[in-house]
Image (spheres, rainbow, N blue to C red):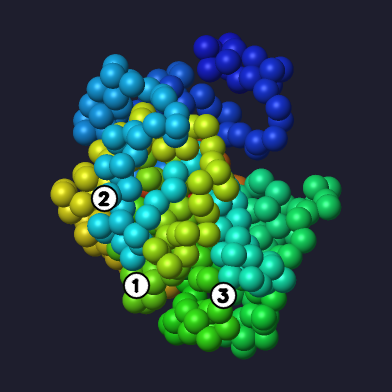
């Protein structure tokens, strides 16, 4: 490492920040469209997008204008009062989803906490307090706060944090009989990602989500979809559950909702909304003017400028190109999975996603991993097809050594 400004900053960060992240040795200082730049001026094509957050890329004029204008007029008040952009964002969300009402918070984990609390309270207010169990899937990811962590079906994230809250069961993802066996009369909710993202990009078999819907209806449990990573057009539809025509009772959102300004949301139907009445739940920053003004700008741009349809088309091209690569490199690639611009490339035994991440970075591409063996691509939804082709050609080179 040279004695550049970047190296100095990293040395300072090593001294003063908690060491809870494994970080690549760059400081990203600015971005434009689908490019980001480090403190030494090197450019990268961004296939990470802040981990599925920067849906409009960097510095999108509509988002920048909205944030600047809102910052100049009102950054924060309180939910003691009505907030115009919060009302406008809720209105847009309910008009473009199954839901009737929205609650806003600040992150994905918080949105899932709200959903878990709502499901328990819904059963409680129906006179069934024993229905407090939540069923979620092995390999799922729902966040790091204690409730969301208990719902997360990956023991590696639980280690050393016990005791976790009680009342959480995990079943294999995609297995209808396991779900049937788990959803008994003590279960208030089934919580699923329509496509498991962080756990390795797993698309469920057709019929799985509709079976979950039917089971929840038969047995009186709520169906909660965690669309924190899959929502906001990521999979080529505004909401991933639209691919299977299955609507939940509750949906959680965060990540791309405000294009990078921190926000979370829980959308609910009227039938269940009453479970959280005045004073039952809340958060200081939730739905604040700055974050929700950003959300309005993002959602309007997605809807008005055909961004989701474009993402679907580029995503199809990307998947096909990676499948071509897998066919050429069968000893290096085990599988290619995903929908829209949520794509995972599973490497063969003996190859590590971390090595691909490193080589790509040296060549000016940011890509992420999803577990040790899967390279994950979640670029801004405005990524150009030519950039996809350049990345796939580079991946072909990296994997060529194994062919
Ligand atoms: N749920 C899903 C599906 C996620 O992918 C994530 C984050 O990766 C979360 C929840 C947690 O969101 P946050 O990191 O904003 O708390």
For image coordinates 21% across by 44% down, the residue present is 301
Q: Residues within 10 Å of mark 1 (few under 14, many from 20)?
A: some
- Classify the position of the N terminus by image quarter: top right
Q: Give the structural element (helix, strand or loop) at label 1.
A: helix
Residue for badge 3: 221
Q: CA distance from mark 2 to mark 3?
A: 27 Å
Residue picked out by circle 1: 243
In the image, is 260 to the left or to the right of 335?
left
Q: Upstream in the sequence, badge 2 or badge 1?
A: 2
Q: Position of residue 187 (x, y in %)?
A: 65, 74
Under circle 2, the secondary element is helix
Q: Which residue is mark 2?
A: 92
Q: Residue at the location (16% across, 48% down)?
A: 305
State the SS at label 3.
Answer: loop
Q: Is residue 169 above or below residue 148?
A: below
In this orientation, which residue lies closer to the viewer: 269 or 317? Answer: 269
Residue 33 drawn at (x, y percent): 28, 35
Label located before the other in sequence (2 or 3): 2
Q: Is residue 324 visible?
A: no
Q: Residue at x 18, y 53 (%)?
A: 306
Residue 283 quadrant: top right
Tell me if the residue at label 2 has its CB under 8 Å from ligand 1. Answer: no
Q: Are marks 3 and 1 in contact (CB under 8 Å)?
A: no
Q: Are marks 2 and 1 in contact (CB under 8 Å)?
A: no
* Residue found at x 51% / y 65%: 224
- Give left or right: position of 167 versus 111: right
């Amino acid at each position: 490492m040279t004695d550049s400004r970047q190296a100095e900053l990293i040395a300072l960060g090593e001294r003063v920040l908690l060491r809870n992240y494994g970080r690549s040795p760059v400081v990203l200082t600015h971005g434009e469209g689908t490019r980001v730049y480090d403190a030494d001026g090197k450019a990268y094509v961004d296939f990470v997008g802040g981990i599925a957050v920067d849906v409009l890329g960097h510095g999108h004029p509509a988002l920048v204008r909205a944030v600047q204008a809102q910052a100049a007029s009102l950054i924060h008040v309180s939910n003691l009062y009505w907030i115009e952009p919060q009302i406008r964002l809720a209105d847009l969300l309910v008009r473009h989803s199954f839901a009737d009402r929205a609650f806003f918070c600040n992150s994905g984990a918080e949105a899932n906490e709200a959903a878990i609390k709502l499901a328990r309270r819904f059963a409680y207010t129906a006179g069934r307090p024993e229905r407090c169990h939540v069923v979620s899937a092995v390999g799922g990811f729902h966040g790091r706060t204690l409730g969301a962590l208990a719902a997360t079906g990956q023991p590696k994230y639980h280690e050393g944090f016990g005791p976790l809250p009680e009342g959480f069961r995990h079943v294999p993802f995609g297995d209808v009989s396991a779900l049937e066996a788990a959803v008994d009369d003590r279960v208030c909710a089934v919580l699923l990602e329509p496509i498991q993202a962080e756990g390795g990009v797993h698309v469920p078999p057709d019929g799985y989500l509709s079976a979950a819907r039917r089971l929840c209806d038969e047995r009186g449990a709520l169906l909660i979809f965690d669309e924190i990573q899959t929502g906001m057009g990521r999979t080529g539809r505004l909401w991933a559950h639209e691919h299977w025509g299955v609507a939940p009772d509750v949906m959680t959102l965060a990540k791309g909702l405000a294009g990078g300004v921190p926000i979370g949301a829980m959308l609910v139907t009227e039938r269940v909304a009453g479970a959280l009445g005045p004073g039952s739940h809340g958060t200081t920053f939730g739905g604040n003017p700055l974050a929700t003004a950003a959300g309005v700008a993002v959602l309007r741009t997605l809807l008005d400028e055909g961004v989701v349809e474009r993402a679907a088309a580029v995503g199809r091209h990307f998947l096909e190109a990676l499948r071509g690569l897998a066919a050429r490199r069968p000893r290096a690639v085990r599988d290619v999975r995903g929908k829209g611009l949520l794509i995972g490339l599973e490497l063969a035994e003996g190859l590590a996603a971390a090595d691909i991440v490193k080589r790509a970075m040296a060549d000016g591409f940011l890509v992420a991993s999803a577990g040790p063996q899967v390279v994950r691509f979640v670029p801004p939804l405005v990524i150009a097809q030519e950039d996809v082709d350049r990345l796939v050609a580079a991946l072909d080179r990296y994997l060529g050594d194994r062919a």
